[in-house]
Image: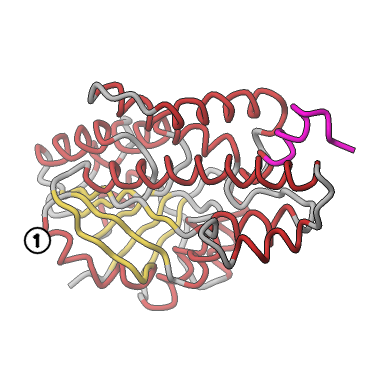
Amino acid sequence: MLVKLAYVGLGNMGLPMAKNLAKVYDTVYGLNRSKGKEELFAQAGGKVGLSLAELAQTVDVIMTCLPLPADVEKVYFGEDGILANGHPGLVAIDFSTVSPDLSQNIYEAALEKEIDFLDAPVSGGPWGAEAGTLSIMVGGKEEVFNKVKPVLEVMGQHIYYLGPSGSGSAVKLINQLVVGIHTQAVSEALVLAKAVGLDQQKVFDILHNSYAQSRIFERHYTQFIEKDHYDPGFALELLQKDTNLVQELAQKKGLTLPVGQQVNELLREAKESGYAKEDMSSMYKFIQGKNNLLS
């Protein structure tokens, strides 16, 4: 019976996910670099105060949700990390978006320590994290997935077991490829609509009820572009990190993804042009700028 849980990485996704766990389980520890986020978690009923090494030594399940692959490597492979300190029987679940290779490397290293590891990236954004309606895509041993599925069901509504280690990470990168392409399509479509003098709300209403409809279109327009504010739900620099991982995976498999490659380069250019910390929907502003349409 899983009674002690830990969540490492209380960011835009991790904090609401951990809060939902704390509503159901009596013992849920939180750990974050920014101690302000730990205080918010404690106010929501979570426990704090243990180091990463102490958590790995004592809990039944330790979960991680971190922004960059380098962060994941440090948390798992560091001297004070999960693999160096975890006890036999510990289950580690990584919700981060990383390469399948990194997930497989962690899985194999964990096996040597008698630790079970699942790669379980998520999709649905902070709103899905708060509502507990995330999609969770899981790779690793199926028996381990079944063991922790009740924990995952607290955070997600659509939970998929996909196969061996790395499978979850691969599907998440495919998801991010589509997200990146849709983001670019939305940006270019709305820039064109503005340039020819159309009412953007009417354009959105029409496309939303046509084959051009997508969740990304709805998200970007209604939550960001229409309101003309771009505080990040998901930062542009993180999407570019993900699309770069997509290109690395494609190259490893001997594939060329022409549109995905171009979108990755445009995201890189936008990141370097000052949009890195803004929401990914700010590609709309970036494309306006490239066409000298910014007011």
Q: Quadrant of residue 268?
A: top right
Q: Is residue 279 left or right of residue 110?
A: right
Residue shown at the point (20%, 59%) measured from the top left: 161
Give the image's coloring scheme: secondary structure
Residue shown at the point (50%, 28%) measured from the top left: 264
Looking at the rendered structure, the kind of residue marked 1 is Glu
Q: Where is residue 146 in the image (x, y as percent from the top left)?
A: 15, 66
Q: In this view, does 245 lie to the left or right of 189?
A: left
Q: In this view, does 200 lie to the left or right of 253?
A: right
- Judge whether 287 appears above or below 12 on screen: above
Q: Where is residue 170 in the image (x, y as percent from the top left)?
A: 28, 41
SS for callout 1: helix
Residue position marked by numbered label 1 in the rendering: 143
Determine if the magenta segment contains residue 291: yes
Q: In which quarter of the image is residue 235?
A: top right
Q: Quadrant of residue 100?
A: top left
Residue shown at the point (81%, 57%) measured from the top left: 199
Instruction: Give the camera-side residue of 275 and 58.
Output: 275
- Judge whether 54 appears above or below 275 on screen: below
Residue shown at the point (40%, 56%) measured from the top left: 7
Q: Is residue 101 left or right of residue 270?
A: left
Q: Where is residue 105 in the image (x, y as percent from the top left)?
A: 20, 32
Determine if the magenta segment contains residue 3: no
- Judge whether 196 appears above or below 144 on screen: above
**Magenta residues (range):** 284-295
Q: Where is residue 215 in the image (x, y as percent from the top left)?
A: 52, 60
Residue pushed farthest front?
196
